[in-house]
């Protein structure tokens, strides 16, 4: 096994294919989008075990992978979230649950191994050392190649990394969300851990003026009450800067995250091939290759 997990500089977040902030798309369209992403240079695909009704996202990814060369694809999935909605988040990091989830991941994805396996959310009552110990066994058994954490605190990252090297930390990072720059990004760089940002467009905020003009109907805290007008001003500034650079606000937002460093691999998504080409293909994913560094 190579010392580094090498992936395309841009990954593809598969959440939107099964519906999250949008209506789900058909399986046929979803597969065509994944295949097109691969054709324009994206080889790193990200999903977890609960996206979509009845974990449909992993099943969709599995069907798409059958039409792609598995050895040229880096597949990331996750475990640990039992329930996730606006009212409640239930997580489980027990050893038994981790292994049970892994077997279910493989079955839905129809693969023999997983390249990067994340603990999706941290089960704080269970010491991270215990969960990492079980994931380390999965690596030793050849069932997963690398271990990741999602939305973990600096202390959790440090403790987990002592048990087994963490390859990547997935966390929200965009022009809209920058609090990780103070401690988490420097920590990951000190430990040689890659950063995988999601929600690069601010959950649609940078997608276009039409989105911004409808913010008042949103339930997101950043776009309710007095925050609406403040964020409209922010969007207007981004829009003017994008116009100066000859691109769209979405392209500018994606390019900003993309150029935070070679250890940063953003995972934008798309539900239409045109959007994929406009927002992702336009910033040249074929010209950039990234590396998640792993220390042994």
Image: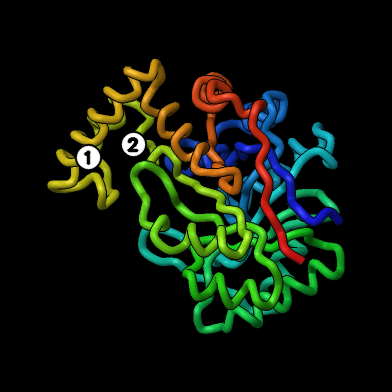
Looking at the rendered structure, the secondary structure element under dot 2 is: helix
In the figure, 236 relative to 133: above or below? above
Answer whether labels 1 and 2 touch (C-beta < 8 Å): yes
- Point out residue 53 in the picture as x, y percentages from the top left corner: 56, 49
Q: Quadrant of the N terminus?
A: bottom right
The residue sitting at the top extreme is 246
In percent of width and height, residue 195 lies at: 56, 53
Where is residue 77, by image quadrant?
bottom right
Q: Residue drawn 47% across and 69% down?
A: 153
Residue at coordinates 42% horizontally, 57% vertically from top-left?
A: 180
Q: Which residue is disc 1 drawn over?
A: 231
- Looking at marks 1 and 2 on the same chain, the residue that comes earlier in the sequence is marked by 2
Q: How is the rendered protein coloured?
A: rainbow
* In the displayed structure image, the side of residue 69 where residue 172 appears, left or right: left
Residue located beneath label 2 in the image = 205
Depth order, front residue of 10/78:
10
The relative height of residue 135 versus residue 286 in the rendered view (above or below) is below
Q: Residue at x 26, y 32 (%)?
A: 235
> Does residue 31 appear anywhere in the picture?
no
- In screen coordinates, is 143 left or right of 203? right
Number of numbered discs visible in the structure rendering? 2
**Residue 275 picture location, percent across and down:** 51, 23
* SS class, disc 1: helix
> Quarter of the image holding residue 250?
top left
Measured in 3D between alpha carbons, the distance from the residue under mark 1 to the one under mark 2, in whole angstroms, is 9 Å
Q: Residues within 10 Å of mark 1 (few under 14, many from 20)?
A: some
Dot 2 surroundings within 10 Å: few (below 14), some, or many (20 or more)?
many
Which mark identifies residue 215? none
């Amino acid at each position: 096994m190579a010392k580094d997990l090498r992936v395309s500089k841009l990954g593809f977040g598969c959440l939107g294919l099964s519906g999250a902030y949008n209506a789900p798309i058909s399986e046929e369209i979803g597969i065509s989008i994944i295949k097109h992403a691969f054709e324009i240079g994206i080889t790193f695909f990200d999903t977890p075990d609960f996206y979509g009704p009845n974990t449909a996202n992993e099943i969709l990814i599995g069907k798409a992978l059958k039409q792609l060369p598995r050895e040229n694809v880096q597949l990331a999935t996750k475990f640990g979230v039992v329930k996730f909605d606006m009212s409640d988040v239930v997580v489980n990091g027990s050893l038994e649950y981790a292994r049970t989830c892994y077997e279910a991941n493989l079955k839905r994805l129809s693969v023999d191994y997983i390249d990067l396996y994340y603990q999706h959310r941290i089960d704080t009552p269970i010491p991270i050392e215990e969960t990492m110990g079980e994931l380390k066994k999965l690596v030793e058994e050849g069932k997963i190649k690398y271990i990741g954490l999602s939305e973990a605190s600096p202390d959790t990252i440090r403790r987990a990394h002592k048990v087994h090297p963490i390859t990547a930390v997935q966390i929200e990072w965009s022009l809209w969300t920058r609090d990780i720059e103070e401690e988490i990004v420097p920590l990951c760089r000190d430990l040689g851990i890659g950063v995988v940002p999601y929600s690069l467009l601010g959950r649609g905020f940078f997608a276009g003026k039409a989105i911004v003009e409808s913010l008042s109907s949103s339930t997101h805290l950043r776009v309710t009450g007095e925050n609406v007008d403040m964020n409209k001003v922010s969007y207007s500034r981004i829009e003017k800067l994008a116009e100066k650079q000859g691109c769209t606000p979405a392209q500018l937002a994606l390019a900003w995250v993309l150029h935070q460093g070679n250890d940063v691999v953003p995972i934008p998504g798309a539900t239409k091939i045109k959007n994929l080409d406009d927002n992702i293909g336009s910033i040249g994913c074929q010209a950039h290759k990234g590396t998640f560094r792993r220390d042994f």
